[in-house]
Amino acid sequence: MAVVSINSQWCKGCGICTAFCPKNTLELDQGGKAFQARPDDCIRCGMCALYCPDLAVTVDRPRTKGKISQQEVQA
Ligand code: SF4
Ligand code: SF4
């Protein structure tokens, strides 16, 4: 399952996300667009989304059990 979504319309292929990913999961494809080549290695740190200058990256961060429990308490 994809952990990181990259908007190919916004990605300009600068390679910043590939350089900052601590687990080296991102690569540029033949068209110069970033994609997640090794999603199983992603630790969801968010560095790629933080440093993308074009806001093209979204990281899917699942809610923790603690947060879900807190929401259930407030419901
Ligand atoms: S940092 Fe953003 S614009 Fe640059 S390659 Fe990665 S997704 Fe594309
Ligand atoms: S969330 Fe972190 S580990 Fe995953 S692709 Fe982005 S920079 Fe790499």
Image (cartoon, grey):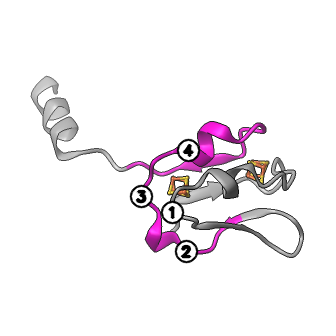
Secondary structure of the residue carrying numbered label 1: loop
Secondary structure of the residue carrying numbered label 2: loop
Q: Nearer the viewer, residue 17 or 66?
A: 17
Taking the image as shown, residue 46 lies to the left or right of residue 55, namely left
Kindly report the distance in space between the C-alpha atoms of the residues bearing marks 4 and 1: 10 Å
Q: Earlier in the sequence, mark 4 or mark 1?
A: 1
Q: Earlier in the sequence, mark 1 or mark 3?
A: 1
Kindly report the distance in space between the C-alpha atoms of the residues bearing marks 2 and 3: 11 Å
Q: Earlier in the sequence, mark 2 or mark 4?
A: 2
Q: Residue at x 21, y 36 (%)?
A: 67
Label 3 residue near ligand 2, CB within 8 Å: yes
Q: Which residues are magenta?
A: 35-61
Label 4 residue near ligand 2, CB within 8 Å: yes
Residue placed under numbered mark 1 in the picture: 23
- Mark 3: few/some/many CA within 10 Å (<14, 14-19, 20+): few
Residue placed under numbered mark 2 in the picture: 38
Q: Residue at x 17, y 46 (%)?
A: 65
**Residue 64 at x, y = what percent?**
24, 45
Looking at the rendered structure, the kind of residue marked 3 is Ile
Outermost residue to the top: 74
Residue placed under numbered mark 3 in the picture: 43
Kindly report the distance in space between the C-alpha atoms of the residues bearing marks 2 and 1: 9 Å
Kindly report the distance in space between the C-alpha atoms of the residues bearing marks 1 and 3: 8 Å
Q: Are marks 1 and 3 in contact (CB under 8 Å)?
A: yes
